Amino acid sequence: MKILMVCLGNICRSPLAEGIMRHLATVRGLGWEIDSAGTGDWHVGDPPDHRAIKEARRQGVDISGLRGRQFKTSDFDSFDRIYVMDRSNYTNVLRQARNESDKAKVHFLLPEQQDVPDPWFDEALFAPVYKMIYEACENIADQEQ
């Protein structure tokens, strides 16, 4: 299984999701490939936001070595599932879809097309966002095993 996590800048939510899903895949012995990307190009090559790194580390997950990259159309060829964090990400990723097969790979991370709040604007959101993402990743791992 190859999974791509996508948010806006690839410095908060999607690196958290990548780190959490990698952690779960390792703990469960799953041979999954996990990556993350942003729909924007502002943080290409940058590490995750220091607050995301801090929260992940507090939870036993190291995301400090990750680097931002931008989503590209060829990601549809490289990944089985593409999980987006919010409606804006969903729309932006679908704009690059070439066909129905590409579109079928794109899913919201949270059930019922709920948005994962962007914690970048509010430091107090990093812990609850981590928890939301962790629970969603556990659900995915449970369903896909």
Image (cartoon, rainbow, N blue to C red):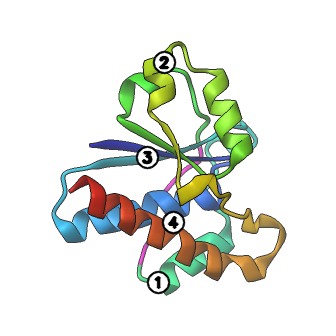
Q: Determine the residue positioned at 62% across, 31% down.
A: 93
Residue 3 magenta: no
In the rendered structure, which disc, 3 or 1, sits on the residue that comes first in sequence? 3
Q: Determine the residue positioned at 51% across, 43% down.
A: 107
2 or 3: mark nearer the eye: 2
Q: What stretch of residues is rendered in magenta?
A: 61-68
In the rendered structure, which disc, 2 or 3, sits on the residue that comes first in sequence? 3
Q: For the residue carrying disc 2, how many other residues have a C-alpha within 10 Å: few (<14), some (14-19), or many (20+)?
A: few
In the rendered structure, which disc, 4 or 3, sits on the residue that comes first in sequence? 3
Residue on which the image places disc 4: 64
Residue situated furthest front in the rendering: 112
Secondary-structure class at tag 4: loop
Q: Amino acid at mark 2?
A: Glu
The answer to which image quadrant residue 127 occupies is bottom right
Inspect this view and state whether residue 11 appears: yes
Q: Determine the residue positioned at 52% across, 67% down.
A: 133
Q: CA distance from mark 1 to mark 4?
A: 13 Å
Q: CA distance from mark 1 to mark 2?
A: 38 Å
Q: Residue 29's x, y, as percent? A: 15, 63
In the rendered structure, which disc, 2 or 4, sits on the residue that comes first in sequence? 4
The mark found on residue 35 in the picture is 3
Q: For the residue carrying disc 4, how many other residues have a C-alpha within 10 Å: few (<14), some (14-19), or many (20+)?
A: some
1 or 4: mark nearer the eye: 1
- Apparent side of residue 112 relative to residue 1 in the rendered image (left or right): right
Q: Quadrant of the N terminus?
A: top left
The mark found on residue 128 in the picture is none
Residue on which the image places disc 2: 100
The answer to whether 81 is drawn above or below residue 86 in the figure is above
In the rendered structure, which disc, 1 or 2, sits on the residue that comes first in sequence? 1
